[in-house]
Amino acid sequence: MKPAMETAAEENAEQSQEKKGCFECCIKCLGGVPYASLVATILCFSGVALFCGCGHVALTGTVSILEQHFSTTASDHALLSEVIQLMQYVIYGIASFFFLYGIILLAEGFYTTSAVKELHGEFKTTACGRCISGMFVFLTYVLGVAWLGVFGFSAVPVFMFYNIWSTCEVIKSLQTNMTVPGDQICVDIRQYGIIPWNAVPGKACGPILENICNTNEFYMSYHLFIVACAGAGATVIALIHFLMILSSNWAYLKDASKMQAYQDIKAKEEQELQDIQSRSKEQLNSYT
């Protein structure tokens, strides 16, 4: 029978080995996470969520401001209301598409990183896999260019609301300094082309304009458009990040395919050499 001290030492050694094995497994799993793709996915989800959520609410507030202060006749802004409603439906589609696309790109990052190769052993790259990876590169490039346009378009309402807000600040400063009457300063929404020129009243001046700027709808819509524009910019950055990652993964798959072809040729040559050597030994044995 073994002494008690030796038995305890063996148990402690086994426990330490199990702990070490678990620690190494955790480190190996953490090493298999594509952190670059994960950061890009989080940034993409955040940007799209800000753009879609804030943009949807801001568009609703914009319609309310126009109906109450700049276009009291429903027929004057009927086309604008339909366009805004269509844009809101497009926002729903954008949110759904990018949710799925971000998950697909994250999965692609998991399966093309070199850490996955270390976890699951050697894997075979196929022409179909390389084609899919190249397709993602092209699609992400197209989406990045499209989102540059979305980012520029989202800056237009920010510019419009900023002009109205800055005009209200001018009216306040004139009232404080008592220099020029604020009634002479107006904002005409019709010049932006969002409502027709025959819309009534179409513009707001002096105290009326100042009251518009003090409403919660104007304040919320202005700041929500700013956040939506920032979300569009974050999405552009995320897509550029994804494009760099996908290009790197595609180059990795291309190199892996070349290495795979080289190893197949080398294994075939070694097999042929072994066959020749075995035949030579058999012929020598038959002669002897």
Image: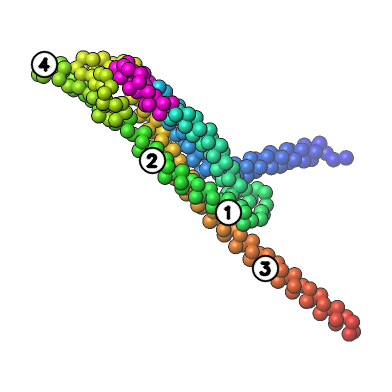
Give above or below for 242 relative to 181: below
Q: Secondary structure at mark 3?
A: helix
- The residue that mark 4 highlights is 178
Would residue 35 be seen by someone viewing this image from the given angle? no
SS class, disc 2: helix
Q: CA distance from mark 4 to mark 3?
A: 90 Å
Residue type indicated by callout 3: Ile
Q: Is residue 20 left or right of residue 248?
A: right
Q: Given the current orientation, which residue lies at the most extreme left position?
A: 179
Give the CA separation, mark 1 to mark 3: 23 Å
Mark closer to the observer (2, 4): 2
* On screen, residue 71 above or below 163: above
Query: Where does the image place residue 286, in percent across and percent down from the top left?
Result: 89, 82
- Mark 1 and mark 2 lie on one chain; the one further toward the N terminus is 1
Residue for badge 2: 149
Q: Please name whichever residue, 114 or 70, is drawn nearer the observer in this view of the structure.
A: 70
Q: How is the image coloured?
A: rainbow
Q: Is residue 269 left or right of residue 77?
A: right
Which type of secondary structure does the marked residue at label 1 adopt?
helix
Q: Main secondary structure of the magenta part?
A: helix
Mark 3 packing: few (<14 Cα in 10 Å), some, or many (20+)? few
Residue 165 drawn in magenta: no
Amino acid tagged 4: Met
> Would you identify the image quadrant in which residue 277 lies?
bottom right
Task: Please report whichever mark, 1 or 3, sits nearer to the chain's N-terminal start.
Answer: 1
**Along the line of sight, which residue is nearer the eye, 185 or 41?**
185
Q: CA distance from mark 2 to mark 3?
A: 49 Å
